[in-house]
Image (cartoon, rainbow, N blue to C red):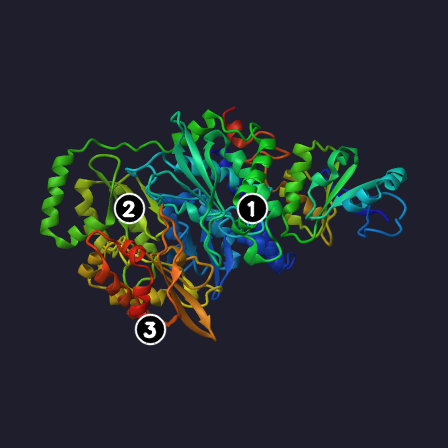
Amino acid sequence: MPERIIKDGAIVEDNWQVVRELEGDLPSGNIIVPAQRWLDEKDALQARGNVAVWLASDQSPKMLGDAINGFELIAVDFPAFADGRGFSYGRELREQHGFSGELRAIGNFMRDQLAYLSRCGFNSFALQNTDLDAALNSLQNFSVHYQVSVDNPQPLFRARQG
Amino acid sequence: MYIYDQFDRQIINERVAQFRDQTQRYLAGEITDEQFLPLRLQNGLYIQRLAPMLRICIPYGTLNANQLRKLADITRKYDKGYAHFSTRQNIQLNWPKLEEVPDILADLATVEMHANQTSGNCIRNFTADQFSGVAQDEVEDARPWCEILRQWSTFHPEFAFLPRKFKIAICGSKRDRAAVAFHDIGLEIIKDSAGETAFKVFVGGGLGRTPVIGSLIHDCLPKQHVISYLDAILRVYNQLGRRDNKYKARIKILVKAMGAEAFKQKVEDEWQAIKDGPMTLTQDAIDHAFSFFQPPAYEAQDAAAAQSTLDDQRLAEPRFAAWLSHNTVAHKQPGYAAVNVSLKETGVAPGDITAEQMEAVAALSEEFGFGEIRSTHEQNLVLPDVRKIDLFALWQKLDALRLASPVIGTLNDMICCPGGDYCALANAKSIPVAEAIQRRFDDLDYLYDLGEIELNISGCMNACGHHHIGHIGILGVDKKGQEFYQVSLGGSQSNDAAIGKILGPSFAQDEVPEVISKLLETYVNNRTEEERFLDTYRRIGIEPFKERVYA
């Protein structure tokens, strides 16, 4: 069943289904499985296709090693919005592993974190119980940034010097 | 002082708009209390015992006259006409209305001020020596570095939801007046063997429930790498710091658990991946920051004539003499002094200031300086550039404003948190304890004879009053619903950093002045001529004090 998510600054229909279980039958269609399950069942899942992975908040992208850039989509789970580990994983995936696929936030993050998540490299957001049209505004909170980040390769101190 | 450009203004205005929208959505029931909590905290807003509290940022303790006037305005318009300086150089309003906070932030933005990241689990205001730029023992002015790092930390997208709050201090002088050993990160400015600016990096210091002295993890970090190195430290902490228990979530617990060497290695590994990238500071960027902190237009002074005038005034007016020797500080520039404006008048909560006093200090900063004011972590203000020939006139005006209590550096210059009178976290009141001690030791001759003593009072384990690092520390504790006070001895916030030792069982509030009196007697009876309280304590140990107090 398609759901609506925010992707690349727009609201779109989405067909990826998050699988939380570490074992058992898998549904058909596009699935996002736990990173650990992918490591455990790598051959079978690769043969199946249409598989993405999600990282739990205590799982660094390093656990996926060289496989990172083989994925069309990687999701990072936020068990609670106050758990900010995923912000670091986002930057690490983009800046250090060069991941260029879809990077999706899932779980209990909130609308007011979209601007920072997007700066850390996330480009899709499976927000729960949120008015998505209104949430799009939160992506636009800031138009100038001091720091280097995924969307801002030059820090302001370099831009100032022209 | 740093002056905003179009980018800084745009960022701060966008922040005000963001929080206005968030507040409206909260009041409309679209954001839960739980979700609103980190949003309001990162805009300085607490919900306190009696009312909300708004903590306004004073970046590294530097203010100008217009900003101080605006603060006075704000306390009248939105609050009760007074405010409180905190131990992190910030200023707090005790009675703002939640729905008016966006307006307060908009007013602050008109004078390039804000309340960003003064609370919450993010990188807080940078603190620095209040005498930066004027201290005689300065290695290099800390303020440009604070500004560079203020910008790095402001709305840093990766580090807004850390395991816990994160405090950074920078010291640019030989004598550490910024307590770098007691911060999550402490930076000490040094010169490397080639004379280039570099940093010693301490990590994992802190007070609170588990006081720890920070570990040195880099003994000479080249200046251009300071941002990438701090980014690496924060990234390690953000990923590995504990999130299961808020009392074990500070970086000090992580550094202790891993060991400083292992932590350092982790940081090195992260750093290698980002070092020499776009975060590397350019000399242009460093020069740009320093351009805002050039020495003001000092006038050449006849230092000898000024000194002889001062000597005459000192002889003619003993109260001025007392103030001169306790409340003024030697200055880099001949013929000038830095002046402490004391916020420790007996009967007034330490660090409190009225709107009228703020306006008067703003005017004095222009009449007797270059319109600049500093706030100190000892909860006083500083006028950094006063001509020595003007000191007498300035003293008269401060005295009339009740801002000249000549007790800087003495027992009665105590650091004190707002305590149970205001704070929802406190176990006990702290302001009445401070006042009782000030009243008990109101004899200036005795106070001066006791010499340099740092007395720090906290109303709870969170240690906002820095009780662990007072030469004498007082901590409010809850004993079966009653307010009691635990006393510790031997702490130090300076280069000889130390954490105080608990004297013994705690005392009722009305016993505290007598206990302090006995501690001081013990010191006086045992000291040698040269010794401060702390020196005597270190030589004779805690036992003689214990015996006297619990006899």
Q: Quadrant of residue A91?
A: top right
Look at mark 3 in the image and give the residue it sits on. B510
Residue B384 vertical position relative to residue B510 in the rendered view, above or below: above
Horizontal and vertical percent position of residue A130: 71, 52
Q: Which residue is mark 2?
A: B363
State the residue in front, B387 or B321.
Answer: B321
* B465 to B149, vertically: above or below: below
Horizontal side, residue B373 vs residue B256: left or right = left
Q: Is residue B76 visible?
A: no
The chain containing the residue under callout 2 comes to B
State how many labels appear. 3
- Does dot 2 land on a helix, a strand or a loop? helix
Q: Chain of mark 1?
A: B
Q: Amino acid at mark 3?
A: Asp
Q: Which of labels 2 and 3 is toward the front? A: 3
Tag 1, which secondary structure? helix
- The residue closer to the viewer here, A68 or B344, is A68
Residue B46 spot, x, y in % from top left: 51, 58
Q: Amino acid at mark 1?
A: Ala
Q: Is residue B345 above or below residue B269?
A: below
Q: Which residue is the site of mark 1?
A: B17
Of the residues shown, which amino acid type is indicated by label 2? Answer: Ala
> What x and y, as percent, mark residue A92?
66, 37
- Please say if the residues under marks 1 and 2 sit with CB atoms less than 8 Å apart: no
N-terminal label among 1 and 2 = 1
